[in-house]
Amino acid sequence: MEYLIRLERMEFRALHGCYELERKVGNRFTVDLEITAELGHVAADDRVEEAVNYLTVYEVVREQMRVTQRTIERVATNIIDALYAAYPEIRHIRCTVSKLAPPLGGKLDRVSVVLER
């Protein structure tokens, strides 16, 4: 049996961007995750140590957001890779990385990339 975990609108200040100024000044980003994992005995036995730990997932995302990248596609890939490495029971991840108020010369709420694997 599998279960779905969602972590929504995690917000970070980070230095991602294709422009040098973005990598110096930074911007605000959000990350949304949907993680499908094998349930095992987590629910039946109430064994938190066998669950995908939300705090650890958040810390993995936070750590990856600290690694400056030129594209949010690379950021999302790094997050997915790190989560699969941390939790072999994960079966599927949908990761959305959004840059808030990107510097595109006009009013824009966000630009987002969604990767699934």
Image: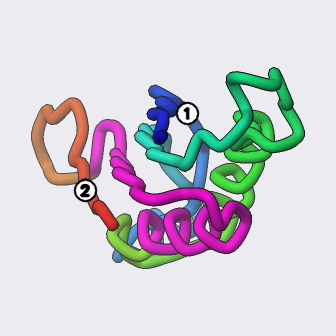
Among numbered discs 2 and 1, the one appearing first in the sequence: 1
Tag of residue 113: 2
Q: Looking at this view, is 9 or 67 the one in front?
A: 9
Q: Say which mark, if any, is on residue 48.
A: none
The answer to whether 28 appears left or right of 46 in the picture is left
Q: Residue at x 55, y 33 (%)?
A: 11
Q: Is residue 116 left or right of residue 79?
A: left
* Residue 22 covered by magenta stretch: no
Magenta highlight range: 75-102
Residue 73: percent from left, percent from top: 33, 70
Q: Which image quarter holds the C terminus? A: bottom left
Question: Disc 1 marks which amino acid?
Answer: Glu
Query: Residue 32 occupies which quadrant of the picture?
Result: top left
* x and y, in percent, of residue 7 in the image: 52, 30
- Residue beneath the point at 70% across and 43% down: 52
Label 2 CA crowd tier, 10 Å (few <14, some 14–19, many 20+): some
Q: Is residue 29 above or below residue 75?
A: above
Q: Mark 1 highlights which residue?
A: 11
Q: Residue at x 54, y 54 (%)?
A: 26
Horizontal and vertical percent position of residue 78: 53, 73
In the rendered view, would you say 75 is above or below 110? below
